[in-house]
Structures are given as C-alpha cells and as structure tokens.
Image (tube, helix red, strand yellow):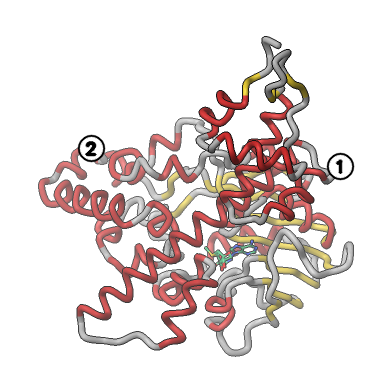
C-alpha cells in the first residue's frame, strides 16, 4: 500500500474536503482503485492524476458530467489533457487581463463623469484580449516595410494567401489574393475599407479544406493562440507553404539583452512559461527559423520596436497597442514605467545602455519560420 494515499491525505493535498472525494467516488467520477485492509479508500498514482484533471477542469468552470466525459475520453491521454488545460487557462488569463483593462477604462471614464453604454458594460464578459485593447491598436501598429519585405519574399510565388490572426491587416501582401482570419470582432471592425475579406475564426480550428491555399501566414499572433502547435499544424493542413513571424522564447542570452525586460519588466518572463520552444514551433510546420533583426526606427510599434527610443515606452498610446502590458497587469506596468522615467531623467538608462546608440538593428529574438 506504500504507493497509495489515504482519502484524508489526498483531500489535504488537493485542498478539497473528504466529502467531495466521497461524492466523486459515489458518482463514478473518481473511484479509488483499491481499499485498505480496514476498508478505507486508497488512491494510486493514476487515481491522483485523474483527480488532478478533474479539479483543473472544475476550476475552469466545467460541470461534473462534462468532466466525466472529458476524463473518460479514450482518445485523450495525460499529455493531451495537460495541453488542453494549459490552453484553457491561458485563455482565461487573457480574458481576465481583458476585463481588468476594460474595468480600468470604465473607472477612468467615470472619474471624468462619463457613463459607459450598456453595450460597453456587457461586452467585457465575452471579451477576447483584443476586444479590450484592439481599439488602441492602429495608433502605433503599422506595416514595417523591411519586415514586410521578408514576409512577402518568403511567400514565394503564392497567389492565394491565408492571413491568420490578421488584425488590421498590416502585413497583407497587396498583390495576392488574401483571405484573412481574425477572432476578435473589434479587430475585424478596424480593418480598413478595401481590406481583404475576413473570416471570424481562430487558428486552432480553421474552417477550410486541406491544402486550399497556396500559403498561410501568421504575424505577431502565435503567442496569443491557446495551443500554438495545434494552430501551426492547422496552417500546415490548409496551405502548401507556411510563413510565421514569431518570437524565440528559448533563453539564449539575448533575452537578457533587452533592457526593458531585463531592468524594468521581469514579469515578461512569466508570460513565456510553458511557451513551446522555437524548435517545437518550427517542427509543427516542418520549417526553418531565420532571425529578424529589429531596425532602430521600426515603424510597427510592437513590444521590442523602441529598443533605441526608450522614451516611447512612457507614452500610454505606445503601451496600449501592445498586449504584453495588459497581460502583466497594471501594477507591473506602473512600476516599470515609473522606474524607466526616473532612469531616463537621471541619465542612468543612458549610462547602462550606451552601446545601443551605435547600433542600427538589434537581435531581440524575433524569428521568421518558413516551411
Ligand atoms: C498583435 S496582433 C497582430 C495582428 C496582425 N497580424 C499584425 O501583425 O498587425 C495579434 C492578433 O492575433 C489575434 N488572435 C488572438 N487569438 C487568436 C487565435 N486563437 N487565432 C487567431 N488569431 C488570434 C488577435 O485577435 C489579434 O488580432
């Protein structure tokens, strides 16, 4: 019995009552595989693994019947459950970040005596992250021509192109037949008149036949997908060629080189926990990774864009157009910005980063995956 745990011990470890475990046993959701000589329930390692899944789905708000169907599904093993749970939790975190942002907005509006409309008040409950932050996107997020040239070159002679997580369409090639995919209603509404047709869908489940496009592209979006590898496989399924502009989360030293995350926003590292390695991402499409250096005057205001223009990060408009700031939360953001402001005025930033002034481009982990 050494490898079995008593019901009391399992309850204590899991932070649930013994009564809950008895109930799970009675309804057949989690029947301990054996009993002690005295007739008490005893849980094996497999039972504990199943309990972990049950409790995680419960925390995500699933009902006990739905959970029973999920954990009894013979086609889903432990790794598949963990991947699914991870995706659902990431989605929940993003939705929480979206709600915090929307609540902050409403507080600000109320402080200025402005009442939000019923539509605005309710929208937050169905919000995707980009439904909350999307309105600020066009202020600083534009096509960076040097990066666009790399992406368009990698598309080769593709005539039909699917752009996934298309946003406002910044990197859509003007000379091809483009179809966009974008799950956020706010982002779809911001697409300029005349932009390519846009389908409301998400990367992990693309509503297209196998091999129905010459190429599929995804720019600055993979880090938002609940299951990046599944989304990349979907791209591979629907298109003959795949081009992805993304980020290498492996710690290869350069992560420490970006002063913003190194000196002011260490919370950025938390966002990368569990993020697939670059090799996993490249393998999902069967492709290779090429570094993309960030020019000092990068036109697209993504997170790393202002590495040689630090004052830009003090600008609220710059931050609001980048999801990292919503995801780390207002406390981390305010602390980072006030420290940066102090260091810029005291000259400490300039002293620490004096080598940057001589650089025209920086290697900050951005990568183009091509297959
Ligand atoms: C940083 S924006 C990039 C937009 C555009 N590709 C660009 O480069 O300007 C990220 C986009 O990914 C979208 N997105 C989030 N989750 C997604 C998912 N599961 N599938 C596809 N797109 C998603 C967001 O709604 C948002 O428009």
Q: Nearer the viewer, mark 2 or mark 1?
A: 1
In-image side of 190 versus 172 (left or right):
left
Q: Is residue 276 above or below residue 41?
A: below
Give the CA distance from mark 2 to mark 1.
Answer: 56 Å
Residue at horizontal 74 percent and vertical 27 percent from the top? 46
Characterize the local packing of mark 2: few (<14), some (14-19) or many (20 or more) Cα atoms within 10 angstroms. few
Locate ligand 1 by image quadrant: bottom right
- As drawn, the label of residue 271 is none
Decide which of 364, 272 is in the foreground and name it.
272
For residue 216, what is the image quadrant? Answer: bottom right
Q: Is residue 183 above or below residue 18?
A: below
Is any part of residue 171 visible from this angle?
yes
List x then y, in percent, for residue 242.
75, 56
For residue 280, what is the image quadrant? Answer: top right
List x then y, in percent, for residue 132.
45, 71
Residue at horizontal 68 percent and vertical 43 percent from the top? 83
Decide which of 145, 49 is in the foreground and name it.
49
Q: Is mark 1 within 8 Å of ligand 1?
A: no
Residue at horizontal 72 percent and vertical 58 percent from the top? 204
Decide which of 63, 369 is in the foreground and name it.
63
List x then y, in percent, for residue 299.
43, 65
Characterize the local packing of mark 1: few (<14), some (14-19) or many (20 or more) Cα atoms within 10 angstroms. few
Q: Are marks 2 and 1 in contact (CB under 8 Å)?
A: no
In-image side of 286 versus 53 (left or right):
right
Residue beneath disc 1: 74
List x then y, in percent, for residue 368.
63, 50
For residue 362, what is the image quadrant? Answer: top left
Q: Is residue 112 above or below residue 38?
A: below
Residue beneath disc 2: 352
The quadrant the N terminus occupies is top right
Q: Secondary structure at mark 2?
A: helix
């Amino acid at each position: 019995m050494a490898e079995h745990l008593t019901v009391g011990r399992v309850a204590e470890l899991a932070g649930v009552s013994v009564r809950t475990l008895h109930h799970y046993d009675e309804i057949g959701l989690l029947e301990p595989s054996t009993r002690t000589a005295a007739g008490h329930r005893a849980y094996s390692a497999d039972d504990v693994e199943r309990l972990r899944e049950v409790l995680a789905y419960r925390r995500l708000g699933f009902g006990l019947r739905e959970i029973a169907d999920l954990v009894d599904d013979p086609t889903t093993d432990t790794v598949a459950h963990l991947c699914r749970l991870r995706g659902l939790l990431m989605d929940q975190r993003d939705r929480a970040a979206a709600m915090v942002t929307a609540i902050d907005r409403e507080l600000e509006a109320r402080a200025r005596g402005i009442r939000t409309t019923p539509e605005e008040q309710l929208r937050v409950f169905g919000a995707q992250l980009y439904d909350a932050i999307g309105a600020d996107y066009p202020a600083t997020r534009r096509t960076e021509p040097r990066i666009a040239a790399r992406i368009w070159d990698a598309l080769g002679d593709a005539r039909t192109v699917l752009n996934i997580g298309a946003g406002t369409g910044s990197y859509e090639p003007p000379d091809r037949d483009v179809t966009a995919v974008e799950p956020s209603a706010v982002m779809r509404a911001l697409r300029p008149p005349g932009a390519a047709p846009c389908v409301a869908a998400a990367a992990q489940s693309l509503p297209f036949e196998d091999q129905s496009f010459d190429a599929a592209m995804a720019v600055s979006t993979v880090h938002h997908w609940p299951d990046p590898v599944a989304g990349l496989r979907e791209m591979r399924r629907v298109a003959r060629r795949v081009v992805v502009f993304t980020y290498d989360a492996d710690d290869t030293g350069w992560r420490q080189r970006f002063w913003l995350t190194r000196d002011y926003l260490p919370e950025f590292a938390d966002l990368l926990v569990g993020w697939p390695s670059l090799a996993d991402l490249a393998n999902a499409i069967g492709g290779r990774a090429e570094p993309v250096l960030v020019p000092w005057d990068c036109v697209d205001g993504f997170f790393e864009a202002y590495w040689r223009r630090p004052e830009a990060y003090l600008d609220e408009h710059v931050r609001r157009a980048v999801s990292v700031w919503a995801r780390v939360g207002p406390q981390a953001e305010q602390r980072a910005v006030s420290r940066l402001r102090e260091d810029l005025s005291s000259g400490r930033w300039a002293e620490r980063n004096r080598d940057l002034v001589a650089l025209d481009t920086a290697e900050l982990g951005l990568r183009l995956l091509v297959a």
